[in-house]
Amino acid sequence: MKDTQTQIEFRIRAYGRTELAQLYCPTLTPGAAYRKLRQWITLSPGLTARLETLGSGKSRTWTPAEVKEIVEALGEP
């Protein structure tokens, strides 16, 4: 993510579920942002299956590999 005022680069790394969701939906509450991100993941063809292959759903944190899949499917936050 590049903020035009501060020029922050988005990095692929481990993110908490709501931490990443709030990068995608900064104006929503943490819970609403997470639900919205999960909806986008579900609607993205094949993304849920790819995340399950990587072990998604077993932790409250997305691994760098899972974050990479999400960003490749949805674009950078």
Image (spheres, helix red, strand yellow):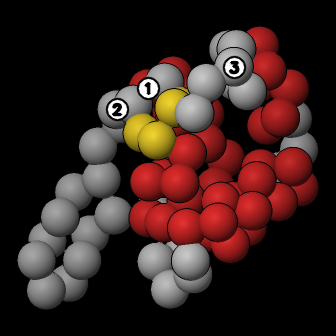
User: Is residue 44 left or right of 71 when viewed as pictured?
Assistant: right
Labels 1 & 3 near each other (Cβ < 8 A): no
Q: Earlier in the sequence, mark 2 or mark 1?
A: 2
Percent of width and height locating residue 30: 55, 67
| Image spot of residue 45 (x, y percent) | 88, 44
Quarter of the image holding residue 58? top right
- Residue at 49%, 24% in the rendered image: 63
Crowd tier of the residue under label 1, counting other residues whose Cα lies within 10 Å: few below 14, some 14–19, many 20 or above: some
The residue singled out by tag 2 in the image is 13
Residue at the disc numbered 1: 64
Residue where numbered disc 3 is placed: 58
C-alpha distance separating marks 1 and 3: 14 Å
**Residue type, numbered disc 1:** Pro
Q: Nearer the viewer, mark 2 or mark 3?
A: 3
Q: Residue at x 48, y 66 (%)?
A: 22
> Closest to the observer: 15 or 64?
15
Residue 46, position in %: x, y?
Answer: 87, 35
